[in-house]
Image (cartoon, rainbow, N blue to C red):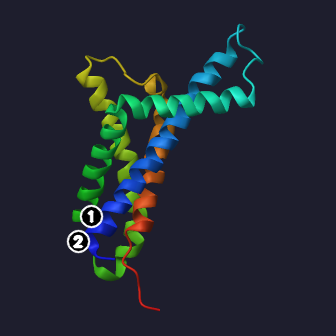
Amino acid sequence: MHRLPRLTLAWLAAAVATLVLASLAATQGALAALSSLAVAAGEISPSLWLETAWRDLLGLIEVGSMPVAIAVALLLGLLITGLILRFIPVTQRPTWRMIGYPLAGAVALYAMHTLLSMAFGGIVPLAAVRESSGMLLQMAAGAVGGAVFERLSRVPTAA
């Protein structure tokens, strides 16, 4: 496969993986907070959790702004990382790719949520990132997306 289609597909797969994991993390945080309340304690069954996770993901997709924000944030982070990697000696690039792209994904999600908060006058649009644990989970989702990109964008080697 040629370079541009391979990179485009890798970026799209990274964005989808990040979106799904970020949505699951946000849902888990919200349900954990609800289950800690006396009103909902013990009332969140696994089937309700799965249904809520599915509906939250569909809601993020229907609104459309979160998938676009994640895709753009990852695009910028991965492009910048790719440019930086050009200055790394060729023999060391594989190691730095495995570090750089997941790190870029994590930083991209942190920057995205921070910029969204700034754009809304300090109001955090995604409740899950109001606490540091939620932000760390979002960053982990970005790191997984970066790892997906790193793996799928590798140049195939002749065997």
**Residue depicted at 54% across the width and 35% down the height:** 25
Instruction: Count all numbered tags in the image, as a single digit.
Output: 2
**Residue depicted at 45% across the width and 59% down the height:** 147
> Which residue in the rendered view is the most extreme toward the bottom?
159
Provide residue 36's location: percent of width, then percent of height. 68, 16
Instruction: Identify the image quadrant of residue 24.
Output: top right
Instruction: Identify the image quadrant of residue 91.
Output: bottom left
Q: Which residue is mark 2?
A: 86
Residue 1 vertical position relative to residue 35 in the rendered view, above or below: below
In the picture, measured across the screen, residue 92 lies left or right of residue 145, that is left
- Taking depth in this image into account, of 19 and 35 the one nearest to the observer is 19
- Taking depth in this image into account, of 137 and 47 the one nearest to the observer is 47
Dot label at residue 151: none
Q: Mark 1 to mark 2: distance in Å?
A: 7 Å
Would you say the residues marked 1 and 2 are in contact, meaning their CB atoms lie under 8 Å apart? yes
Per the image, label 2 sits on a secondary structure element best described as: loop
- Taking depth in this image into account, of 108 and 15 the one nearest to the observer is 15
Per the image, label 1 sits on a secondary structure element best described as: helix
Provide residue 90's location: percent of width, then percent of height. 30, 81
Q: Is residue 28 visible?
A: no
**Residue depicted at 30% across the width and 18% down the height:** 122
- Characterize the local packing of mark 1: few (<14), some (14-19) or many (20 or more) Cα atoms within 10 angstroms: some
Specify the amino acid type for callout 1: Gly
Dot label at residue 82: 1
Provide residue 52's location: percent of width, then percent of height. 60, 27
- Characterize the local packing of mark 2: few (<14), some (14-19) or many (20 or more) Cα atoms within 10 angstroms: few
